[in-house]
């Protein structure tokens, strides 16, 4: 019975990290997918060819979509690798990036398109960008809230000069191997 709380603690400890990672990955995917959809369309006079429908995708219309998606994607690595104050600063940066994505999604949006304009695809592209921004915001806010409870990547190796105390001789041998020393060599 005493083992259940011990095994539940690591799962509870990593739950905020999974929320952050999932939110940022889904947000990055939504922003990238949004950059591939049509964001604007208009008819223009092409001379001899007559009126031609000219479209622009999200990457052409709003150049910030792909960089924001990449920022959210690299934010995953940053949130996993850092800890403490640096993780909170990164999370605030991600919240600001999510807000920027939401602004890009709603800036210049209009309703009531003429016939022949792919309004559904335009609204889907902008809606997907807004959803991606919201997911990045949620991931950033979860990172701010749970920064202290989330596990850190490589905290064991963050200060290689510091000596670790090992209780078990087998663990001490493995740690010596990890440090690049030969534990079987006579001292």
Image (cartoon, grey):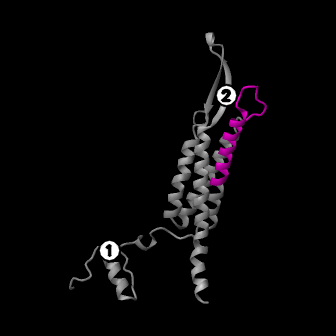
Q: Nearer the viewer, residue 88 or 102?
A: 102
Q: Residue furthest top?
A: 48
Q: Is residue 175 above or below residue 129?
A: below
Q: Quadrant of residue 172?
A: bottom left
Q: Is residue 30 above or below residue 41?
A: below
> Viewer-nearest of labels 2 and 1?
2
Quadrant for the N terminus in the image: bottom right
> Is the residue marked by circle 2 packed among few (<14), some (14-19), or many (20+) residues within 10 Å?
some
Counting from the top left corner in percent of width and height, residue 81 is at: 48, 63
Residue 143 is at least partly visible in this image:
no
Q: Quadrant of residue 115?
A: top right
| Residue 111 covered by magenta stretch | yes
Q: Secondary structure at mark 1?
A: loop
| Residue 77 covered by magenta stretch | no
Quadrant for the C terminus in the image: bottom left
Q: Residue furthest right?
A: 112
* Mark number displayed over residue 147: none
Q: Secondary structure at mark 2?
A: strand
Counting from the top left corner in percent of width and height, residue 180 is at: 29, 73
Residue occupying the point 33% across, 74% down: 178
> Is the residue marked by circle 1 packed among few (<14), some (14-19), or many (20+) residues within 10 Å?
few
Residue occupying the point 57% across, 60% down: 21
Residue occupying the point 60% across, 61% down: 20
Instruction: Please give the residue where the numbered disc 1 appears in the rendered image.
Output: 179
Mark closer to the chain start, 2 or 1: 2
**Magenta region:** 109-136
Q: Quadrant of residue 169?
A: bottom left
Tally of marks: 2
Instruction: Please give the residue where the numbered disc 2 appears in the rendered image.
Output: 41
Q: Is residue 73 left or right of residue 158?
A: right
């Amino acid at each position: 019975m005493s083992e259940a709380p011990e095994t539940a603690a690591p799962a509870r400890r990593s739950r905020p990290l999974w929320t952050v990672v999932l939110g940022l990955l889904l947000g990055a995917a939504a922003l990238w997918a949004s950059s591939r959809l049509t964001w604007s369309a208009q008819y223009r006079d092409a001379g001899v060819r007559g009126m031609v429908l000219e479209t622009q995708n999200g990457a052409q219309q709003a150049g910030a979509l792909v960089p924001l998606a990449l920022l959210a994607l690299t934010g995953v690595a940053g949130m996993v690798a850092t800890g403490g104050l640096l993780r909170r600063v990164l999370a605030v940066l991600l919240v600001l990036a999510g807000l920027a994505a939401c602004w890009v999604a709603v800036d210049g949006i209009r309703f009531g398109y003429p016939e022949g304009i792919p309004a559904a695809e335009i609204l889907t592209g902008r809606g997907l960008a807004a959803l991606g921004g919201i997911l990045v915001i949620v991931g950033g806010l979860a990172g701010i809230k749970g920064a202290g409870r989330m596990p850190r990547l490589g905290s064991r190796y963050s200060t290689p000069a510091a000596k670790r105390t090992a209780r078990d001789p087998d663990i001490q041998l493995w740690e010596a191997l990890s440090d690049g020393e030969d534990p079987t060599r006579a001292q």
